[in-house]
Image (cartoon, grey):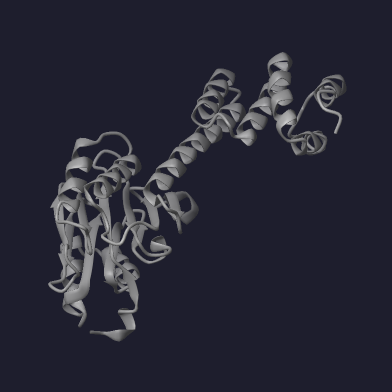
């Protein structure tokens, strides 16, 4: 075995997948190992998604993406990487490329129970599982699900855990989704990048974080609508965000700021009051916003807002 690549242990279950409608690609993974998201999932917009696990050869990630970038297909890349690796018998590798080609490898000496299943635009794989029902359950859940790719992959992780999961238990999880085509702007091309490093219920925490992410998407959509003077669209988006994450003071606060800027002071005051009562730091922040143009109200209305709380 190539010792340089055998010191990363990530016995785990994962899914690599591509959405044939949007073209988005991603990886979702869980393991009883700290920070699984730092070594197993790799993805690049317009290129593909890779999961490298078991006794991990981490180089499969960047090297695999490079080969895909050069125009090779997922099956070609898996074949090339595995053939050149002396530790192939303890490796598990899965790749989906931007055209939906999929390939996977489970080494003969991966710790049982271990295996993979390749489907249309996806592959699920697992090793060191409690039983051999884990990856079939993942495939069934993914195929039965609908909606965004991220939620469908998390559903596959949930199914894995319900079927038995990692024989050692649970610790960390990660979710990465990239766009179908590269814009050349990495910060825009990586649609979702969420990691749970150490948690007693990592898949459920990942699911919660994904919901928070969706709520903030609505907040961002509201801000964009405000920039376009689409008042109805902004209020609808802000309302959706608050409904998804009703206890988040920041969402409430910026919703109140938007209402004030729209001249809807009575509605704004009700929300400001709720936020200030929960945490007076938001009241302190409000005094700083007019000077930088983020709260554009009359002096009288500003005084009405600040009168809600006396520090």
Total marks in image = 0
Question: Taking the image as drawn, is residue 18 in sight?
Answer: yes
Classify residue 303 as left or right of residue 78.
right
In the image shown, does 1 or 19 lie closer to the viewer?
Answer: 1
In percent of width and height, residue 103 lies at 16, 60
In the image shown, does 181 or 264 lie closer to the viewer?
Answer: 264
In the image shown, does 169 or 42 lie closer to the viewer?
Answer: 169
In percent of width and height, residue 80 lies at 18, 73
Residue at x 24%, y 63% (from the top left corner): 71
Classify residue 239 as left or right of residue 132.
right
Indicate whether 61 appears above or below 243. Answer: below
Question: Taking the image as drawn, is residue 58 in sight?
Answer: no
Q: Quadrant of the C terminus?
A: top right
Residue closest to the far left? 108
In percent of width and height, residue 148 lies at 33, 37
Indicate whether 153 appears above or below 253. Answer: below
Indicate whether 220 appears above or below 308. Answer: below
Q: Quadrant of the N terminus?
A: bottom left
Classify residue 85 as left or right of residue 288.
left
In percent of width and height, residue 175 lies at 38, 51
């Amino acid at each position: 075995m190539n010792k340089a690549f055998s010191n990363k242990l990530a016995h785990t279950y994962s899914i690599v997948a591509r959405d044939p409608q949007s073209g988005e690609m991603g990886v979702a993974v869980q393991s009883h190992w700290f920070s699984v998201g730092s070594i197993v999932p790799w993805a690049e917009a317009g290129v593909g998604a890779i999961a490298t696990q078991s006794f991990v050869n981490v180089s499969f990630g960047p090297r695999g993406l490079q080969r895909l970038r050069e125009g090779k297909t997922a099956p070609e890349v898996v074949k090339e990487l595995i053939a050149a690796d002396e530790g192939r018998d303890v490796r598990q590798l899965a790749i989906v490329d931007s055209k939906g080609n999929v390939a996977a490898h489970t080494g003969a000496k991966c710790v049982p129970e271990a295996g993979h299943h390749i489907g249309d635009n996806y592959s699920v794989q697992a090793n060191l599982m409690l039983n051999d029902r884990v990856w079939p359950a993942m495939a069934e859940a993914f195929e039965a699900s609908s909606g965004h790719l991220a939620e469908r992959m998390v559903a596959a992780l949930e199914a894995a855990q319900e079927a038995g999961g990692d024989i050692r238990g649970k610790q960390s999880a990660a979710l990465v989704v990239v766009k179908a085509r590269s814009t050349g702007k990495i910060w825009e091309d990586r649609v979702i990048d969420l990691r749970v490093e150490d948690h007693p219920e990592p898949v459920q925490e990942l699911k919660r974080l994904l919901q928070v992410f969706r709520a903030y998407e609505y907040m961002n959509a509201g801000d964009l609508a405000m920039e376009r003077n689409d008042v109805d669209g902004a209020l609808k988006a802000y309302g959706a965000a608050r409904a998804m994450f009703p206890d988040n003071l920041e969402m409430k606060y910026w919703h109140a700021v938007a209402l004030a800027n729209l001249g809807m002071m009575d509605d704004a005051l009700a929300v400001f009051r709720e936020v200030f009562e929960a945490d007076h730091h938001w009241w302190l922040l409000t005094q700083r916003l007019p000077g930088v143009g983020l709260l554009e109200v009359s002096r009288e209305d500003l005084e009405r807002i600040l009168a809600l709380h006396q520090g």
